Amino acid sequence: MKKHLKLTLLSLLVSCTTGPVPIKYGKDNCELCKMTIMDNKFGSEIITDKGKVMKFDSDECMRDYYNKEKPKLGSVLVTDFNKPGTLIDGKTAYYIHSDKMKSPMGGNLGAFASKKDADEASKRFPGDIWTWEKLISQ
């Protein structure tokens, strides 16, 4: 009986984990536009305060969903353009908005882990550098 109770408690703890879920490129669909998430330089996730994970094919889809639905955030993760497939904190990331950056939904947005990375990338992708606050106000 004790062993069964311990296993039940352990399974409850594991099921309440609110961490990121890796994006399965070529398989997962965007929560907003329903397109298959294909490009590993883009893609993002919203994790609600209850642990629900929603995946997006671009930062602009994630932003539009956030602004429309107003989910209670646990965290926001975006793909680091410089490290394809690597999720970083979306609230501390820097975003380049440039006509030279062709993101999946045509929003011309890419995320970077640091201001230095964004500044360096802006030489290849001239445009505006945004913070989270600027991104969600657009």
Image: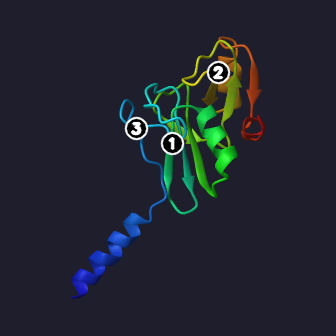
The label nearer to you, 1 versus 2, is: 1
Is 16 rendered above or below residue 82? below
Left or right of 6 on screen, residue 114: right
Left or right of 9 on screen, residue 50: right
Q: Residues within 10 Å of mark 3 (few under 14, many from 20)?
A: some
Number of numbered discs on residues: 3
Q: Residue at x 38, y 65 (%)?
A: 14
Q: Can you identify the residue that label 3 sits on? A: 28
Tell me the quadrant of the picture where the C terminus can be found: top right
The colour style of the image is rainbow
Secondary-structure class at tag 2? loop
Residue 52 percent across, percent down from the top left: 50, 56
N-terminal label among 1 and 2: 1
Kindly identify the amino acid type of the residue bearing the numbered disc 2: Asn
Question: Answer yes or no: do the residues labelled 3 and 2 have beta carbons within 8 Å?
Answer: no
Residue 68 percent across, percent down from the top left: 67, 46
Q: Residue at x 73, y 35 (%)?
A: 135
Kindly identify the amino acid type of the residue bearing the numbered disc 3: Asp
Question: Answer yes or no: do the residues labelled 1 and 2 have beta carbons within 8 Å?
Answer: no
Q: Can you identify the residue that label 1 sits on? A: 31
Secondary-structure class at tag 3? loop
User: Which sits in the foreground, 70 or 131?
Assistant: 70
Q: Can you identify the residue that label 2 sits on? A: 108
Kindly identify the amino acid type of the residue bearing the numbered disc 1: Glu
